[in-house]
Amino acid sequence: MNRLALAVVLTALVSSHSYAQDDESSEPGFNEATFAGLEFRSIGPAFMSGRISDIAIHPDNQSVWYVAVGSGGVWRTENRGTTWEPIFDEEDSYSIGCITIDPNNPNTIWVGTGENVSGRHVGYGSGVYRSRDGGQSWESMGLEDSERIGMIRVDPRDSNTIFVAAQGPLWSGGGERGLYKSTDGGETWREVLGDGLGNDESDDSYTGVSEVHMDPRNPDVMYAVSWQRMRSVAVLLDGGPGTGIHKSEDGGETWRELTSGLPEETMGKTGIAISPQDPDVIYATIELSNRTGGFWRSDDGGESWEKKNEYLSSGTGPHYYMELFASPHQFGRVYQADVHLHVTNDGGDNFTRLQHDTKHVDHHAMAFDPNDENYLLVGNDGGIYESYDLGATWSFAANMPITQFYKVAVDYDEPFYNVYGGTQDNNSQGGPSRTDNNVGIRNSDWFVTLFGDGHQSAVVIEYAFCVCFRPVNRVARVIAFETVTRPFLGADTRHLRHIVEVEHDVEDFVVQWYVDHRIRVRRQYLADFVRPVLPGPVSPEIVDEQEAPALQVGAQSLTFGFGE
């Protein structure tokens, strides 16, 4: 055998052996090898966006924003929101608590993962991250067990000195919680505030630090907020003896609690802000028992306090808000995050609600333009909004697909199936997986199937019905579609036809679609129903359990429970 033939034979043997090894190592099922050839693509939606946790604006270029999303990573824009780029998708956490730009080098960005609110819907983080190229690449900098980080501060005199306010786990005690300091650029961390804040070790195990602030005149003077909380499926304990406001005058090495004029009873979630015009003036919003509390002010660097107002963030509860933002343009003007954004122009004596008609609710983040006193940039559960007239009118960034979906369902529509799902505070929504439009899927292709916080959607495949459920106010909604021919496209498409809405007071119910075009809601318990009124051939009918069998979709009946 000549050398060429021998080489061909050996190559074939090696190749066949390699393929055999690959075949033996490949196993069917849900694993990396199975899905290696698939890639995710975005189908939206962006017409309602999603929950914003923090905003940072480049100090030298007001067109560059970094936006932290509670359930969607970090996004960057270089043109004030005209276009966006997700810059954190390759990292370990999608839940972001805060973002900070190094005041000495704006290309250095610090991110604290894990959103620091106490709702059931929030994710957890994987520590602190740093980028040294404006968000193009990231490196993990530790504190992986902190789970939720409220704030990061960089010493304006020395970029190697960083403070991290780590709240710690929400659903359990322990973890890395407290105020951490690094003097070597984040290579190592040590806790400088956190131990011994409560009455015992049990208190300390649930107490973290949610905020840290520096006096702009002297960064050695610092203020921090500790917060004791415990969440379970059944209850949120949103305060404890570990909660308090603390002050350091030696660069965070030692701390003392500020108490003069502050409530003597146990405090809940607390937020503070330093006046940019007079840093001796400190503002605080404090939660007390039974959703009471108010707004306090200190004129001597926190040494003594005076209660100025009973106003407290409400809505979902103070645990979800309580951030304060002091205006850099006017002394005494302070904004407080709430369901609706509130503002005081006299240091807390009076609060008013900003215009809300064209803006989503539930606010968490705010930023200012140092060159424009009328400009406001805010983030809430519905995304990013900006105002050029101090909140009289708002414009919405309808190009950030960051909606947090709870559950999703699909239909079998042709030529492209549709996706339905319930979302956090942005309704239940439906939209196409693809379209025949040359620009792809648009915001206008998506629609609302049920308002409020969305929950579970299901599709009756045989009859093109999407059934949406929301337990908060016990409403079921049935969305019907009809086939409409569009001759200019040569295809049939489905359009929203009818909506049936049923209010109920029962634990469970079954929505049924019958061949005689009647929708029936079956009683499973004694309850009264509000009979909906529908035009056209589709009409709802309430029947007792024994009068109608449940419709089977595949092997399952459309039965849903409503436990709170």
Image (cartoon, rainbow, N blue to C red):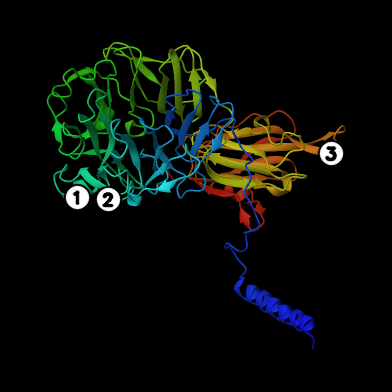
Q: Quadrant of the C terminus?
A: top left
Q: Earlier in the sequence, mark 3 or mark 2?
A: 2
Amino acid type, mark 3: Ala
Q: Which mark is residue 491?
A: 3
Residue 287 or residue 504, whichever sits in front: 287
- Residue that mark 1 sits on: 202
Task: Report if residue 510 is visible in the image.
Answer: no
Identify the residue at horizontal 55%, vertical 44% (top origin): 456
Query: Cβ–Cβ below 8 Å for labels 3 and 2?
Result: no
In the image, residue 433 above or below residue 80? below
Q: Residues within 10 Å of mark 1 (few under 14, many from 20)?
A: few
Q: Determine the secondary structure under disc 2.
A: loop
Task: Give the alpha-carbon distance from disc 3 to disc 2, as whole Å.
Answer: 58 Å
- Residue that mark 2 sits on: 173
Q: Residues within 10 Å of mark 3 (few under 14, many from 20)?
A: few
Picture coordinates of residue 402, whole percent (x, y): 54, 37
In the image, residue 483 above or below residue 285? below
Amino acid type, mark 2: Gly
